[in-house]
Image (cartoon, rainbow, N blue to C red):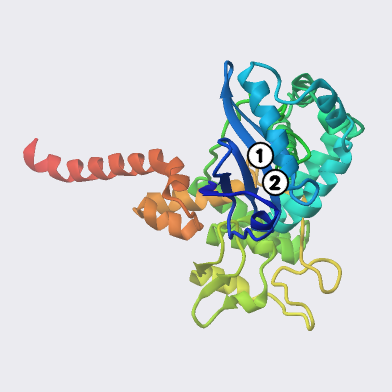
Amino acid sequence: MARFERRRLNNRTVAALKSDRETLVWDQHLPGFAVRVYPSGTCTYVVQTRGPYGARRVTLGRHGVIGATEARRRAWQVIARIKAGQEPLPEHSTSRRATGPRLADMAARYMDEYVAVHCKPATVRIRSAAIYRHIVPRLGKMRIGSVRRRHVIALHQRLAATPVLANNAVITLSQIFTKAQDWGILAEGANPCRHVELYRQRKRERFLTEVEFKRIGRVLDQAEDSGGATPAAIAAIRLLMLTGCRRGEILGLRWEEVDLEARELRLKETKTGPRVVPLSPAAMKVLVGLPRYEGSPWVIPGRKPGTHLVRLGNAWRLLRKRAGLNDVRLHDLRHSFASSALALGESLPMIARLLGHRQISSTARYAHLARASVHEAAARVADSLAEDIL
């Protein structure tokens, strides 16, 4: 959230502004006139005031493109229009913004200047897929100021058969408009994705039983003997089951992150930051049995020398079919690791540590399993006493 300060805004004071996080600096003399300072050093003039139809905030322009004097003049005009119940920007100004950059160009800048710098690889892939498979083909030729809510809804509805993809497309598009506002290309409040209702996404909960784990184990043994999956893919699947790690954490694992003496994986980069994963004897056995290739840092090697395995999907689909578990996803192995820990009496905070959850609320989805374990424990205790009291 932006911090708030008050100063006399002129070219000299604005040029000297620095901040390690987003900050709003308000003018001492013109209420509602401010400059937004970003950690990158960019400063954008904004104005905020209230009129008959509520509060409005409008971006006036980036410092360097316009000066403080011109920004102040525009602020006076915008404040007067809002208080009179008019649109903050005159029609000719709005029309000029509608001929701004094409959405495809804005999306490319968003990927280069924001996503590539601030997001993790998995997020980069999700945003890139949403932009280049769905957003750009449908809306890329439009000027960013011409995109309306009806265009966003049409895109969303076109992907209704895949709710996750549909929602990701709208979320990504909304972020593009947010950055366009931050960069002074669009007025604040001009995001057409606002109030577009996302589809409900039903969270799947599939937990393997002990019998199903044994079936997968047998199938993996058979694949090692007769083929059907590469040794690297088989090892990756075994490690997913034995550690509860995310797929990317295992596929991107480097030997320098493996400490066999301490029986730990010391992951430098995960979804929630660096973390330590304890290794069981079974996981240790898998790791010790893996070959090491000279010049390759990867624990799970790819087909080409010096690369790591990227996709497990094909191998997993074949193996789960052999095991008769067509509804089990790779990520369900992580859920099943958590459910097995709960069945053994581990607490939710402990499981959060094992899974690398930063917030205990992420582990709360397993709370109903914990209650089931409590009921089972209560039944066992009651049964042991029943012989004496009944």
Q: Amino acid at mark 1?
A: Val
Q: Work out whether 210 lies above or below 181.
A: below
Tell whether 153 sits left or right of 289: right
Can I make out residue 214 in this image?
yes
Disc tally is: 2
Tell whether 123 sits left or right of 350: right
Q: Regarding mark 2 in the picture, which secondary structure is present there?
A: strand
Q: 10 Å neighbourhood of mark 2: few (<14), some, or many (≥20)?
A: many
Quadrant of residue 145 in the image?
top right
Q: Amino acid at mark 2?
A: Thr
Q: Position of residue 8 (x, y in %)?
A: 58, 49
* Residue 292: mark in rendering: none
Q: Residue at x 42, y 49 (%)?
A: 360
Q: Regarding mark 1 in the picture, which secondary structure is present there?
A: strand
Q: Position of residue 310 (x, y in %)?
A: 77, 59
Residue that badge 2 annotates: 44
Residues at discs 2 and 1 in contact (Cβ within 8 Å) = yes
Tell whether 32 sits left or right of 142: left
Q: Name the residue nearer the viewer: 96 or 321.
A: 96
Report, in whole angstroms, how far the alpha carbon at label 2 lies from the one at label 1.
6 Å
Q: Work out whether 14 lies above or below 332.
A: below
Quadrant of residue 82 in the image?
top right
* Residue 46: mark in rendering: 1
Can I make out residue 189 in this image?
no
Q: Which residue, as the protein is rendered here, is positioned at the far right?
A: 141
Q: Name the residue nearer the viewer: 201 or 321.
A: 201
Q: Name the residue nearer the viewer: 378 or 155.
A: 155
Q: Residue at x 70, y 43 (%)?
A: 182
Q: Residue at x 44, y 54 (%)?
A: 352
Q: Which corner quadrant holds the C terminus?
A: top left
